[in-house]
Image (spheres, rainbow, N blue to C red):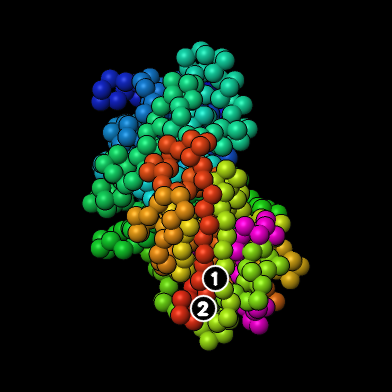
Amino acid sequence: MRFGDAIVERGVPCVMRDGVTLYSDIYMPVGEGTYPVLLMRQPYGRMIASTVSHAHPLWYARHGYIVVIQDVRGRGDSEGEFIPFVQEAEDGYDAVEWAAALPRSNGRVGMYGFSYQGLTQWAAASLAPPSLKAIAPSMCPSDLYHGSFYPFGSFSIGDKLPWAFQLARDTAMRAGDTAAVELCSQTMRHPEDRLFHVPVLDKHPVLEKYFPAYYEWCEHTEYDDYWKERDWTAKFLEHPVPALHIGGWYDTYLMGTIRSFEALQSAPAKEGMLHRLIVGPWAHIPWGRKAGGVDHGPDADGNVHLEQLRWFDYWLKDDRTADQAAEPKVKYYEQYSGEWVTADSFPSELAPGECRLYLSGSEKPAGGALGGGRLKEAAADIDGEAVPDVFVYDARLPMRTDSFLPVDRSPVQDRYEILVYTSRELAETLRLAGSPKVKARVQSLAGPTDLVATLTALLPDGTARFLSVGRTDIGGATGESSEGCEGEWEYAEITMRPVAAALAPGTRVRLELTGSAFPLFVRHPNGGEADKHGAGEDGLKIAAVAVASDGGRPSWLELPVRRDPHIS
């Protein structure tokens, strides 16, 4: 059939090595000749084709590509049972080689798409199908544990629970269970009650029936063999193909995107191999101009559609109009300047002490934005008379952080349960590019708990825009975890999410310290609960954490300052 001046074949079968048939829609250019193939494998219904973030397949077909959109095993019309992630390697290999042999194909295949459609690329590429020549994974990691499910060693429940109900809904739909479909749809849209439900491992009957993998994610809290099987990085590096990584500053999987790119960049160079990274001012959905109440300007899209087309033209059509190998490998949007910056690498590390701001108390406690917490530029400026500051974290009422969007956190910062440290006004523009770090001297009362650090930009109008966040466990070093026990002073270190921002003169840097960022991270129940995911209502305790900020026990924030801007 013809659709939008392209030839479309719907429901084309593709038989896997074990006899299971998967179904695809194929969009082809009108006219004679052979063309390279772009393959997308996804679990949400192939008609969608990642159009929440990518151009419709018709657009690529009109630019000289055969585009294949395939339902993965057990999704849409495809046969078999859906087992997320692990089935995608062999199925992806088979799909690539099948696509390469399609009529009018020239034998060269690229893969594209975002989120799960990006994960299917890493999985397929890990087995090195001969016909796969390039990939463009967007907003997804090659290492699921560190880059998606436990990015700071804490389960990202706010993201994964609604998604699990979405996948359960589609399984229930295939089974004809309309009641379960309705329940899953409601929970996807309004997950609040279930997010607060404890124990985390208390199995919801519908989720257990239609998507039991969710509880496997919750049970495997460490990087064990389960997660190693879902980490494609090492296998990919054995036989890499060119990869265009696309991420968003406000996307859940930002750390995974950058981590994957850095792994490829740090690997031994191979002739003819090239990897690039683009990071825009985008959440997972949408990739637009406005996010978190901030207008990022008319250039916010970064020409991402054309960048992807240019990428595949280079590798699948040998289009050398531009020498991409000579171009900067990284392109990212700098918040607040509105500029796109180019570089040959993205700095996730920084030189110790490069830009260090010391936490300092004062005559007033540091609880809340109106408190006495300060960020000082020299250790000598710390108020040596100030007592350690303390926050109290009640696991029954965790402090909220609902997203990574650049929202105004100033109302939250009025809470006395949050320690707030603020710098003086900047006298000149401060350009950040990389991962901020916190090293704090802390002591927990009543055993193990969480320490969460949040970085914001306090603008002259009083809004405190989110920049970055990170967390770590504290209070477990001494083994004292019973109610009322005092632990020893320890240094807690947090490497936060990467950020790129130009903070203008008059802006202040602000750091929050507290015990939770729920539901970005599953809440710590506090105390001696060995299994955080097994704690019930009676296991949710109250913890107090002291933070020292004196000359003998300094605590500090390190900022990744960019010294050599290159504005594109």
Q: Read off the magenta span.
A: 412-435
Looking at the picture, tell me which residue is in the foreground, 25 or 482: 482
Report the amino acid beneath label 1.
Pro
Asked if residue 230 lies left or right of residue 408, the reply is left
Residue that protrudes farthest toward the bottom in the picture: 380
Report which residue position mark 1 lands on.
388
Q: Any mark on residue 38, and which?
A: none
Q: Residue at x 43, y 73 (%)?
A: 350
In the picture of the structure, the residue carrying the numbered disc 2 is: 550
Q: Would residue 143 be visible to someone looking at this image?
A: yes
* First-in-chain label (2 vs 1): 1
Mark 1 falls on what kind of element? loop
Q: Position of residue 3 (x, y in %)?
A: 57, 29
Q: Quadrant of residue 264?
A: bottom left
Q: Distance of mark 2 from mark 1, alpha carbons?
A: 8 Å
- Taking the spot 43% from the left edge, 64% from the top edge, the residue there is 492
Left or right position of 278 against 509? left
Residue under the image location 54 percent in, 46 percent down: 395
The amino acid marked with disc number 2 is: Asp
Residue 276 in view: no
User: Residue pushed farthest front?
Assistant: 484
Does 1 sit above or below residue 246? Answer: above
Locate residue 63, reporting x and y percent: 50, 44
Quadrant of image for the C terminus: bottom right
Q: Position of residue 292 (x, y in %)?
A: 66, 53
Residue displayed at 72% across by 63% down: 463
- Seen as rendered, the residue at the extreme left is 238
Element type where label 2 sits in the image:
loop
CB within 8 Å, label 2 to label 1: yes
In this view, 490 is above or below 94: below
